[in-house]
Image (cartoon, grey):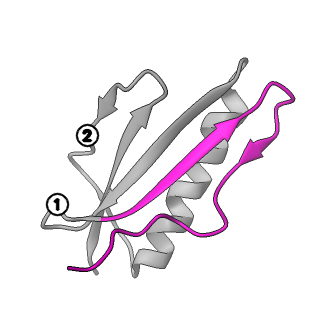
Amino acid sequence: MPRFFFNHRSQDNQNEVDIEGLKLTSLHEAIEEAAFAAKGAVALAEEPVSGEFMIEDEGRVLLARVPYVARVEGEAETPAEPDLPKSS
């Protein structure tokens, strides 16, 4: 199984680098995991919050970005489709 890394960028541009990663079956499963984590971050927030999970493969190549935003009303927004880097 491939290992995926979930780096996080907060709304104040602080980066947290995932050094352990998770072994998952596919990029699709990794995106679902990031969306779940984003919903958790939003649920714990007591004020508007935003951020982004950047999913990398074992070679530390960026595969997808999963941004999230919580508005004042407390409703989370996650993208219907993740932001996937363009192939060269």
Dominant secondary structure of the residues highlighted in magenta in the image: loop
22 with respect to 35 (left or right) = left
80 part of magenta stretch: yes
In the image, residue 45 lies at what x, y percent? 68, 24
Choose top left, top right, bottom left or bottom right for residue 27: bottom left
Residue 57, image x, y percentages: 24, 67
Looking at the figure, which quarter contains the N terminus?
A: bottom left
* Residue in the image at 71% along x and 35% along y: 70
Give the position of the C terminus as an image quadrant. bottom left
Left or right: 9, with 88 as reference point: right
Give the mark nearest the N terminus, 2 or 1: 2
Which residue corresponds to mark 1? 60
* Residues drawn in magenta: 63-88
Which numbered disc covers residue 84? none
Q: Is residue 87 above or below residue 5?
A: below
From what the image shows, is residue 75 above or below residue 46? below
Residue in view at x 72 percent, y 48 percent: 77
Residue 25, position in %: x, y?
Answer: 39, 81
